[in-house]
Amino acid sequence: MHPVLPWLGGIAVLSFLPLITRTAYDQYLLNVIAINVVLAVGLNIVKGFAGQVTVGHVAVMAIGAYASAVFSVHLGLPFWLALPAAMAVCAGVGLLVGIPALRLEGAYLALATLGLAESVRIVISGTEWLGAAMGFEGIPPPHIGGFVMETHFRYYFVVMPIAVMGIYISFAILRSDMGRAFKAIREDQLAAAASGVHVAKFKLIAFVLSALYAGCAGSLKAHMAPGYLNPNDYSLQEMVTLLLMVIFGGIGHIWGAVIGAIAVTIINDLTQDYYTYRMAIFGGVIVLTVMYMPRGIGGMIEDFWVRKRFAALRAATKARQAAP
Amino acid sequence: MNLLEIKGLSKRFGGFRALSGIDLNVRQGAVHGIIGPNGSGKSTLFNMISGVYLPEPGSQIVFNGTDITGKPSHEIARLGVARTFQMLRIFEGMSVIENMMVGHHGLTGYSPLAAVFGVKSVRSEERRVRAEMMELLNFIGLADYAEMPAGEMSGGQRRLLALGRAMAAKPKLLMLDEPGAGLSPTNVDILLDTVRALQQRFGLTVIIIEHILKLVMDTCETVSVLEHGEKIAEGTPAEISADHRVIEAYLGREMKDEEVRDFLRSA
């Protein structure tokens, strides 16, 4: 059986999801969740697997969104071409963001990417042909012939399959030799290199892959009704929300990132009215998660599973060691 | 025939000369020991051979006929040089079998794109790698722990895993950095038996850095002695045992021949 088949089954099952939603708003929320899943799963590749601390991810998403908007509005490209073109632009950006990662580690890399994130937002806010602070309007929805996906219901059948395939690709990559190389870099670069892993190359690949996901998410966001982008949607607050998804879900766990994206998007929506306190709450949850549940929900589930599986083995080893 | 030929290898860190003009030849198939007091440059030597540090001009390292001076770590590894680390540096957040599979990275042949498209050959290659690594784990006695996170292993098991990961690359040259450190005498014996078994089975050349003199004297055919970044002696264990400079390097004073023999017998 080809490994993609179960995922196609997943798409088929999820196709029924909009039927149980009552309002167009619920359908909108489903689409936002799907887009955030793409974003979080992508961030997980560079942060969770390759272990590179980047906080510039929203900037890459912004570049993807605006590139896609420019391609379709100014160049007249249809969505189906604007999406891959925007992703290609983001791959280039990912490569640029990755270069400092070859020299910087941890907090220093975070600072460098933070600088990038803010400067992108500020540049967009001041650029007339990108709509400046007023925002970019009139981005057309995707269409196949005369069938236009302008409603959230129809758009769901664009974003949901892409999100599911995004998860599949992430699994395929991370369970491959390359995924193991990423994790080895995260664990110990010196030992990874001594095992024959080309550390610099794989770091850059991780950044590029992750940027491809961010570009895809950005483009999906741009073409979703009402086809409007605002630079303030790519601020540090959004980055905190995105980090929360990955950290709460469990760094280095693909399903963790998916669960985190779903949970945080819904919580984010339910707490709309408490906007002023939300960032404080999110920040607090990140700190508490890092302190008491450093590997997130995904890590907790894995720990439980591992403990159960190896309890017997460990007991046997101990008994053998205790025996004279 | 020499598998490794080092000429005039030097390294300084700031004002400190870690290695000054070391010449070292390691014969194909040999088990070569390197001893010396703390700070004598043993680990620096390994780090230079494996490409962690850049050598200074005038240094030359030739491995298996290829000049590897100044090449990056991963390329040297792929040419067939594997090593362990004093601090082990196993991938604690990965399972035991994954650690082994990273070790086999240079010999795993498929593109990531093929993995995305779920090509059949990728799955058969993954099966091959997994099966080979299981066989190796079996050989070093860790097969039961294949799926266990490496971070959960005991000290002795970690040392074995570090050895296994190095072996996973099917190296021509295996460099062990203090393999016996922190092990009980029983575990040292287990480890040594494993190294010997691996060496015979795979026709390896092995370089061992060690503090435990007995381990070196029992295992190695040739021993080089470093002190203050210089090679002060080289020869068979018997010759080294008779060398007064070696004893001085370790004990810091002159000893009579009988004393030397007693010391080495007790070590």
Image (cartoon, rainbow, N blue to C red):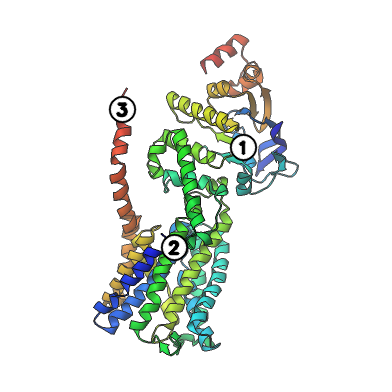
Vertical arrangement, residue B31 with respect to residue A122, above or below? above
Q: Amino acid at mark 1?
A: Lys
Q: Quadrant of the C terminus of chain A?
A: top left
Q: Amino acid at mark 2?
A: Ser
The Cα–Cα distance between marks 1 and 2, rounded to whole angstroms, is 35 Å
- Left or right: B137 as drawn, with respect to A303: right
Q: Which residue is mark 3?
A: A322
Q: Which residue is mark 2?
A: A170
Q: Amino acid at mark 3?
A: Ala
Q: Nearer the viewer, residue B92 or A3?
A: A3
Do the residues at discs 3 and 2 belong to one chain?
Answer: yes
Which residue is drawn at the image coordinates 49% and 51% (left, top)?
Answer: B124
Q: Residues within 10 Å of mark 1 (few under 14, many from 20)?
A: many
Q: Chain of mark 1?
A: B
Q: Position of residue A261 (x, y in %)?
A: 35, 68
User: Could you tell me if the residues under marks 3 and 2 are in contact, i.e. CB atoms within 8 Å?
Assistant: no
Q: Which quadrant holds residue A49?
A: bottom left
Q: Which residue is mark 1?
A: B172
Q: Chain of mark 2?
A: A
Label 1: which secondary element: loop
The Cα–Cα distance between marks 3 and 2, rounded to whole angstroms, is 44 Å
Q: Position of residue B121 (x, y in %)?
A: 51, 55
Q: Nearer the viewer, mark 3 or mark 2?
A: 2
Q: Which quadrant holds residue A292?
A: bottom left
Residue B8: image tag? none
| Residue A135 visible, this angle | yes
Which residue is drawn at the image coordinates 45% and 64% (left, top)?
Answer: A169
